[in-house]
Image (cartoon, helix red, strand yellow):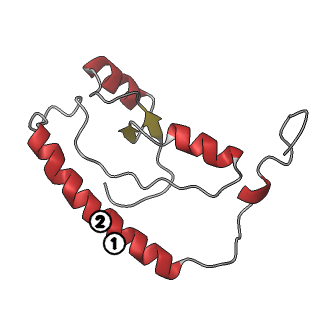
Amino acid sequence: MPPSTGRLFCHHRGPRFSTKAESNTYRAWGMSIVGMTAAPEAFLAREAEMCYAVMAHVTDYDVWHVSEAPVTVEMIIKTLNQNTRTAQQSIHNLVKALSDKRTCTCESALANALSPTRP
């Protein structure tokens, strides 16, 4: 999947692969990608009023994709290594291009939160 925004991410508790029933349910819900991370991190970043973005790297097709070969550990390790190089280059490029000026509202995300006290 090429880099994109506006996709739907489904958090899947792992580490394990989806069952075929789970996979078909995620597809029916319109999910673009299934992963075992991002949900706890996104919630914690929001609560800390930090900017957050997901850089999701696909390692394999989910079980619904019957036209692809069954996933093996070797396939995943090979793809993980490729993804590591891609992620490192992406972060290198981001650091060079990132502005010091914030243009988002993340730092005040909790301004209207319901809480008895705010630290």
Q: Position of residue 90 (x, y in %)?
A: 38, 69
Q: Name, please, the residue furthest toward the right.
A: 116
Q: Position of residue 79 (x, y in %)?
A: 19, 52
- Name the element at disc 1: helix
What residue is pinned by disc 2?
86
- Quarter of the image for residue 55 reads bottom left
Name the residue: 39% across, 36% down. Answer: 36
Using the image, tell me which numbered label, if any, was put on residue 56: none
Considering the image in quadrants, where does the C terminus appear?
A: top right
Q: Position of residue 108 (x, y in %)?
A: 80, 55
Q: Position of residue 114 (x, y in %)?
A: 86, 34
Q: Is residue 39 left or right of residue 44?
A: left
Asked if the residues shown at circle 2 and circle 1 are in contact, with their CB atoms under 8 angstroms apart, the answer is yes
Q: Name, please, the residue furthest toward the top.
A: 21
- Quarter of the image for residue 4 reads bottom left
Distance from the alpha carbon under mark 2 to that under mark 1: 5 Å
Q: Name, please, the residue furthest toward the front.
A: 119
Q: Is residue 95 above or below residue 104?
A: below
What residue is pinned by disc 1?
89
Name the residue: 87% across, 43% down. Answer: 118
Q: Is residue 108 left or right of residue 96?
A: right
Considering the image in quadrants, where does the N terminus appear?
A: bottom left
Q: Amino acid at mark 1?
A: Gln
